[in-house]
Amino acid sequence: MAAPRILLAGDVFGRLNQLFKRVQSVNKSAGPFDALFCVGQFFPDSPERLEEFMNYVEGRSSVPLPTYFIGDYGVAAPKVLSTASKNSANLGFKMDGLTICENLHWLRGSGKFSFQGLSIVYLSGRSSSEGQQFGTYSQDDVDALRALGPSGVTTRASLADVPAEASDSSGCDPAISELVAEIKPRYHIAGTKDIFYAREPYSNTDAVHVTRFLGLASVGNPKKQKFIHAISPTPACTMSTSEISVKPSNATLSPYTFEEQTGRLKEVTKRPGDSMSDSQYWRYDVSKKRQKSGDGDGLCFKFIYTGSCPRGEQCNFQHDMDSREQFRRGVCLDLLLKGKCEKGPECSFKHELQNEAENPPRRRVGSGSMSVNRSKECWFCLSSPNVESHLIISVGENYYCALAKGPLVEDHVLVIPIEHLPNTFTLSQEFESELVRLRDSLQLYFRNRQKEAVLFEWVSKRVSHANLQVVPVPSSRAAAVPDIFNMAAKRMGFKLVSKKFDNILDRRKWLRTQFDENSNFFYAEVPDGTILTLSVDENEKFPAQFGREVLAGLLNMPDRADWRNCSLSKEEETSAVEKFKEGFKELDPN
């Protein structure tokens, strides 16, 4: 795979004509380039540039290649960004940017996403404690992201190459220097100083690669300093250890381990709950993308999902009542729209059309012949031809334990009811003791390996067979788990209910009192014995993989939030199961 070719630009200040003219020239002479990333202020700094800027936003002028920007402040920023935030295609946390217009994407707040094998980390806006909606980042963003944008970058640099403006500490946030020292990026790009400064590469503590810092001037700056720069970094995941360890002859020591800085960095104000200091939280996309056929014969996503369409007779897609009814009965939306589902065992919907005899209204899932019919197609029923029996670790009377398909981390397992039931609360409370014994055995297994177990379950009317996920996290990260879950929920506009118990049976009893079968329900059990819960109305958007995505952020592996990125061969799965069984056999309650 060829290394992606990236253009970088400094503060734009709304000068899009000049920026894109230069981009097209560079693209023609040295391209093609895959994307443009802009740092510093992107919006106009005066009303005189607003018409030029809005020509692109409103589609009268075209953006020549995919362009991503931070610096969401300036003239008209609140209006433009507020409109974009309300766009249905931009709902939820989109790691790869909210679309402003074709090819123009706003990197909001803080986040991390993959671009052609590269990990892109960003922090947007200016430091502020006032909680403005646009144009600023808060301590929450800094604490959650552990991101970029330091002061002190000129320390240990060759003084002959340091512009005077680069040594000016105004506009710098010293707390972010500490974050950069932790994250150790291969490239760090910054704006706002209106100068071009390419620092010598510097080595990192506890990492083999060097970091290259690049400061860019503003577009059209009067001093004619460089405002656009091209790079073509090879993704680290494709490089050998020897390749990524190469240090240029002019490399310096890290500017963030300088002895004179040590005391100041330790004095950076910490928020309550310093357990978050080594954690990460990454945004994720919870939007539901519309599937359009384009030929007028396709089904209307809006109608199938909600039962109505604001376009009425003007809609170019079919308002099919049969498909709407199938969706209400829990049939997979992708199956209805595309004719197939590519999510595999993680999909919580049904994959066969349902008739009234198979799915009568208000009938309890898991009872009678319906359970038998559903189990034939279920990925988790032991009697199903679809079950992947090589993943099974242990089988009890009412529950079994299996390796997760596409595990987030090594030893990620599922605890699954043997009966075809939609959640772990459907089984009688008398069976809780078996679940508790299995949970305690798994927790001891992980603690023997310096890890702690995080358990979570997503309960939805559309989940046909329950699966309680058990994910081990390093003991050093365990204290940060409740904070990261609470922050993730807060950023989505939700507030988790938290209650701590010493006894696991008391936790389960309390959970049953919180569960309402008329709502969707998420809960997590974190290592200190705290239970986090959230009831979600049927019409509220909430990611079914919330627990996995949050832990992927905590463990700094956002690319593994999607199980499909973590698939193993059958041989690898079998080997992992046998390894787990060998270590678990003395603890297995079954």
Image (cartoon, grey):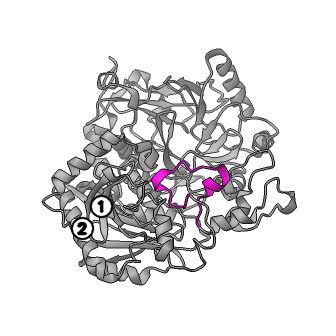
Q: Position of residue 16 (x, y in %)?
A: 72, 35
User: Which labelled disc corresponds to residue 401?
Assistant: 1
Q: Are marks 1 and 2 in contact (CB under 8 Å)?
A: yes
Image quadrant in which you'd find residue 333: bottom right
Find disc 2 in the rendering and name its residue.
438
On the question of residue 274 being in view, the answer is no
Which secondary structure, mark 2? Answer: helix
What residue do we see at 71% from left, 30% from top?
64
Q: Is residue 55 magenta?
A: no
Q: Nearer the viewer, residue 563 or 238?
A: 563
Q: Position of residue 467 (x, y in %)?
A: 39, 64
Q: Which residues are magenta?
A: 330-351
Asked if residue 94 is positioned above or below residue 458 in the image, the reply reads above
On the question of residue 31 being in view, the answer is yes
Pointer 2 local density, CA inside 10 Å: few below 14, some 14–19, many at least 20? many
What residue do we see at 52% from left, 56% from top?
128
